[in-house]
Amino acid sequence: MELEQLRADMIAAMKARDKARKDSISALVSAVKKAGIDAGCREDIPTELVDKVILKELKTVKEQIDTCPAEREDLRAEYQARYDVIAEYAPRMMPAEEVTSYIKEHFAEELATKNKGLIMKAVMGALKGKADGKVINEAVAALCR
């Protein structure tokens, strides 16, 4: 995802008077800009950094939904709306079957040891940002059995 695309979508949401969507995208743009400044690339923010920030924000909103009190339906609906908007921009994650086949194909030597910690260390470095950590963990656990 490109920062310019996020900005264009934020402007489109402003013109459409869609406050919830505009606020969600605006929060993403702000987080991306902050990450860009922290990384020292204020002007030319790479797409990998944008994707990383989007995934982080998606995880944060998911945690907000999970920890929201049951009696606060209004708050839960607001968080869910924000989650839905951010999910549109999140990079596609590898499904469990694809993760398992990738691990078998690229990490056969590590799998032979049946050492889950060693395998996780190698795999997480290669699949960071491409697959969910929980999916990777479950795949590695299944392959170590």
Image (cartoon, grey):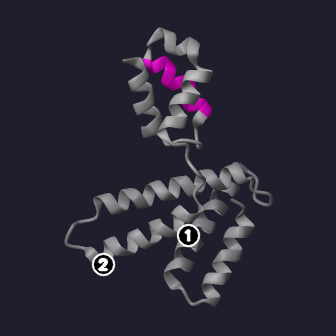
Residue 89 drawn at (x, y percent):
59, 62
Above or below: residue 38 compared with residue 28: above
Above or below: residue 1 compared with residue 108: below
Label 2 to label 1, Cα distance in Å?
20 Å
Q: Are marks 2 and 1 in contact (CB under 8 Å)?
A: no
For residue 88, what is the image quadrant?
bottom right
For residue 43, what is the image quadrant?
bottom right
Q: Amino acid at mark 2?
A: Asp
Q: Looking at the image, can residue 134 be seen? A: yes
Would you name the residue on which mark 1 appears?
A: 27
Residue 55 drawn at (x, y percent):
54, 53
Would you name the residue on which mark 2 appears?
A: 74
Q: Which one is in front, 88 or 61?
A: 88
Q: Quadrant of the C terminus?
A: top left
Q: Amino acid at mark 1?
A: Ala
Queried whether the magenta region covers residue 135, the answer comes back as: no
Q: Looking at the image, can residue 38 be seen? A: no
Above or below: residue 136 compared with residue 22: above
Please provide the residue range marked out in magenta: 116-126
Q: Which one is in front, 53 or 132?
A: 132
Circle 1 packing at 10 Å, graded few (<14), some (14-19), many (20+), is: some
Please report the residue visible at 52 percent of the width from the left and 84 percent of the height from the top: 19
Element carrying mark 1 = helix
Query: Left or right of 82: which side holds 123?
Result: right
Query: Left or right of 145: which side holds 120?
Result: right
Q: Which labelled disc corresponds to residue 38?
A: none
Query: Left or right of 12: which side holds 132?
Result: left
Residue 126 drawn at (x, y percent):
62, 31
Please report the residue visible at 80 percent of the width from the left and 57 percent of the height from the top: 44
Residue at the left extreme, as displayed: 71
Please report the residue visible at 69 percent of the width from the left and 56 percent of the height from the top: 36
Element carrying mark 2 = helix
